[in-house]
Image (cartoon, rainbow, N blue to C red):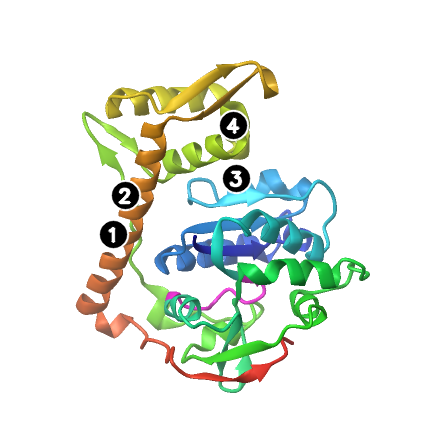
Amino acid sequence: MGTGALLIVERSEFPSGPAWGHGGRPSPIHRMVRTLIRAGTDLIVLVTPPDCLEALQKHVARMSVLCIAPDSGAAVLTLLGTGLVYLQDKCSRILVSTLDYPFFSAETAVALLEPEAPLLRPVCGGREGYPIRLFSSLIPQILKKNKDESEEHFGLNEILNGSGLSCTGLEVEDEGAVLPSQRAFDPPQTAIFPELRLRLVRKKPFFGPGASELLSLIEEEQSVRLACQRMGMSYSKGWKILCDMEEEWGAPLILRRQGGRNGGSSSLTAEGKALLEAYRKFEKVAQSLVQEAFRNCFPFLCPPHPRSGEVRAETSPH
């Protein structure tokens, strides 16, 4: 299994809260997603209350992330549980954060994914920060320990405290990991960074981040219609993209079946699964090479790597 990230987007951020950004600055959501992409995270999931889902999907359209919502409820515990259950069998290591600490660097995210401590968080200058990284094997314990608690006023730290787990601190040289979003903070060393969007081209461009997300959602939902809805895309536009994709690729990518949910079901063919897997691998390798080239060509813009080997004594997440 690969690596994942879960960002908890609370209702207080809607419809025009601080998550949306202001003054021409990137929103905390956009900043965090781009950081996680640069860190090479395989799957990025944003979870939000049901009535906020559509607005969130529009805000992150074409960013190669997945937005989900619980059937009901808006408490952090409900959102966290929904996201963790979704990621449990897809990722072995998961970065988790609310939008309160959006300034952590890609280097910190990478450093958090490496050590073998089951529950880990960054520490800078004696202060504990975000994101928190956990092994997916801890998810049953986290959810079981908190299921009988009153959840309305629980934050992420209270939930992890309630699980009875000890959190290990990873020393990093990244002030952004411990600074809350209310602080005016735009570290110059991370203000400029490379952003890579890869597309496959034959006669014309036909496969990129949007197409990758569409195929992923079709495979998950077993429905083209539901996949399009989750992307905020019309059904007809979705089918046009799929037809263009199949024409340029030269083989069927979608298997259509009669009957089932919404009058029919769809899934990826073996060719479609192979294309999606190869593109994801290509994207991850290319991102890594671009980051290395950026550090070599623009060393004055790059922060030093966090000291990922320095893991300190266990602490409670608070």
C-alpha distance separating marks 1 and 3: 27 Å
Of the numbered discs 3 and 2, the one sitting upstream in the chain is 3
In this view, the mark in front (2 or 4)? 4
Type of amino acid under label 3: Lys
C-alpha distance separating marks 4 and 1: 29 Å
C-alpha distance separating marks 3 and 4: 22 Å
Type of amino acid under label 4: Gln
Query: Label 1: how many residues lie within 10 Å, few (<14), some (14-19) or many (20+)?
Result: some
Task: Return the residue at label 2.
Answer: 198
Residue 26 visible from this viewpoint: no
Task: Return the residue at label 4.
Answer: 222
Main secondary structure along the magenta-highlighted residues = loop
Against 4, residue 242 (above or below) is above
Of the numbered discs 3 and 4, the one sitting upstream in the chain is 3
Question: Left of 282 or right of it: where is 141?
Answer: right
Against 59, residue 236 (above or below) is above
Of the numbered discs 1 and 2, the one sitting upstream in the chain is 2
**In percent of the image, x 66 and y 62: which residue is there?**
141
- Please state which of residues 16 and 88 is positioned toward the viewer in this rendering: 88
